[in-house]
């Protein structure tokens, strides 16, 4: 009798164990794997102002969607890589993200890094959406590259027209050749439109930031006294130093800056009075009262303890393009086709229209630093 009872107890335990194993297997089979999204940008070094802000915005977008349950019950996982503003590293980091099995990549933030990474993602069939790469060399191609910032053909032309409208006719120019797909590209477009409109380029000076030049001698070569404006195309850190040297030379002429030149979130504090009168064109209006933007600004500032820069706004939009596409069709293997099927989506400050090659058409704003604050000089029509 005792043996029968013992045998029965053992059989009961075996049955319970078997049921537990089956339950675990069922749970394991039904648990949905996360959708991996890559982020790549310059998050260390003097170009990190763009990369860090863009990374943080991508993180926020992913966190918010995960808080809403993800996509069809699948959470998103953001995998971050630092390209260190080095083309070889960018190529390597793109390869790492591909090996991680990402469905898409947000970034890079610099045109030269996007050019380096594109062959890797193209070969792997991975969508790449850049927040801030604007080189014309990336335009008009039926590939895996998309972006939410206008190409230089529009951006630089708008800046040239704005300068002329503001009465700037004689312009001295200094630019960094280390990011040629951006700086040289934008200068060539700008110069063509500026001269056609009656302007004159009084002097142009180039430098390679990798060589860590002394900027005072370069600024002296500009001959700023003969110009009624100075254009600076360089990183935020270098633009600040150049602006300071320009002011030390005694000129109070307006300084025109490329977008990457004013990306530094604490530019005003770093540059002091040197930033007074700085003019730039952006697809982002920091004074916008659009509900989506004001909500984002509040959430971003609370999450990261600093206000979002234009790079953060554009990176959030870039991430939303990917997420909007995945919501439309969660099949990551069809992501490129899905993104291409979206001709317009909701950005933080209004709808963003995309052409057949993934280039955007957005409002552009002329902004100027005056009395320690940003002011909008125009209000574009929708």
Image (spheres, helix red, strand yellow):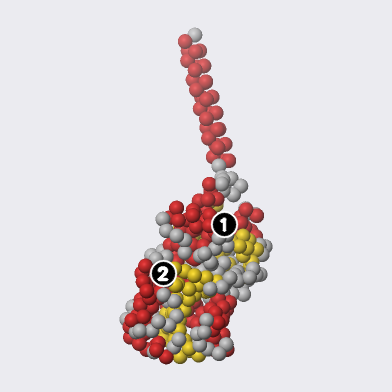
Residue at the far front in the pictured view = 371
Residue 247 is situated, as x and y percent measured from the top left of the image, at 36, 80
Q: Residues within 10 Å of mark 1 (few under 14, many from 20)?
A: some
* Res 337 quadrant in image: bottom right
Q: Mark 2 points at which residue?
A: 372
Residue 49 is situated, as x and y percent measured from the top left of the image, at 42, 66
Residue 170 sits above or below residue 333 on the image: below
In the figure, is residue 332 to the left or right of 264? right
* Res 103 quadrant in image: bottom right
Residue 380 sits above or below residue 207 on the image: above
Residue drawn at (37%, 72%) of the image: 271
Q: Which of 104 and 164 is in front in this view?
A: 164
Q: Which of 213 and 341 is in front in this view?
A: 213
Kindly state the secondary structure of the residue where label 2 is placed: loop
Say whether disc 2 or disc 1 marks the residue closer to the N-terminus. 1
| Label disc, if present, on residue 237 of the rendered structure | none
Q: Name the residue under label 1.
A: 292
Which is closer to the viewer, label 2 or label 1? Answer: 2
Q: Which of 44 and 330 is in front in this view?
A: 44
Residue 304 sits above or below residue 284 on the image: above
Q: Residues within 10 Å of mark 2 (few under 14, many from 20)?
A: some
Whole-angstrom CA distance, mark 2 to mark 1, is: 26 Å
Residue drawn at (64%, 68%) of the image: 382
In the figure, is residue 104 to the left or right of 270? right
Residue drawn at (50%, 88%) of the image: 169
Residue 192 sits above or below residue 356 on the image: below
Residue drawn at (59%, 75%) of the image: 139
Residue at the far top in the pictured view = 1
Residue 257 is situated, as x and y percent measured from the top left of the image, at 46, 77
Q: Can residue 249 be seen in this view?
A: yes
Residue 202 is situated, as x and y percent measured from the top left of the image, at 45, 90
């Amino acid at each position: 009798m005792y043996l029968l009872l013992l045998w029965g107890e053992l059989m009961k335990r075996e049955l319970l164990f078997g049921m537990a194993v089956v339950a675990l297997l069922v749970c394991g089979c039904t648990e949905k794997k996360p959708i991996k999204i890559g982020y790549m940008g310059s998050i260390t070094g003097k170009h990190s102002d763009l990369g860090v802000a863009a990374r943080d915005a991508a993180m926020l977008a992913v966190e918010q969607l995960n808080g809403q349950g993800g996509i069809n019950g699948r959470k998103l996982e953001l995998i971050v890589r630092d390209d260190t503003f080095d083309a070889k590293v960018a190529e390597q980091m793109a390869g790492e993200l591909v090996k991680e099995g990402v469905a898409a990549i947000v970034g890079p933030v610099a045109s030269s890094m996007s050019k380096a990474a594109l062959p890797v993602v193209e070969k792997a069939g991975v969508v790449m959406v850049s927040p801030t790469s604007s080189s014309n060399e990336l335009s008009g191609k039926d590939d895996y590259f998309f972006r939410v910032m206008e190409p230089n053909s529009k951006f630089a032309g708008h800046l040239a027209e704005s300068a002329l409208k503001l009465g700037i006719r004689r312009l001295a120019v200094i630019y960094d050749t280390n990011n040629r797909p951006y700086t040289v590209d934008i200068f060539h477009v700008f110069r063509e439109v500026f001269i056609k409109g009656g302007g004159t380029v009084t002097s142009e000076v180039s430098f390679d930031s990798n060589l860590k030049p002394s900027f005072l001698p370069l600024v002296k070569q500009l001959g700023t006294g003969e110009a009624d404006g100075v254009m600076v195309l360089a990183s935020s850190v270098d633009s600040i130093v150049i602006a300071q040297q320009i002011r030390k030379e005694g000129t109070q002429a307006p300084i025109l800056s490329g977008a990457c030149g004013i990306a530094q979130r604490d530019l005003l504090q770093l540059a002091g009075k040197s930033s007074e009168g700085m003019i730039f064109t952006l697809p982002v209006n920091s004074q916008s009262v659009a509900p989506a933007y004001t909500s984002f600004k509040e959430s971003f500032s609370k999450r990261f303890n600093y206000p979002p820069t234009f790079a953060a706004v554009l990176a959030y939009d870039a991430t939303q393009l990917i997420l909007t596409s995945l919501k439309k069709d969660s099949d990551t293997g069809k992501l490129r086709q899905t993104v291409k099927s979206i001709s317009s989506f909701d950005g933080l400050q209004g709808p963003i229209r995309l052409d057949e090659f993934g280039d955007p058409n957005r409002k552009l704003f002329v902004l100027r630093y005056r009395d320690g604050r940003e002011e909008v000089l125009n209000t574009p029509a929708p």
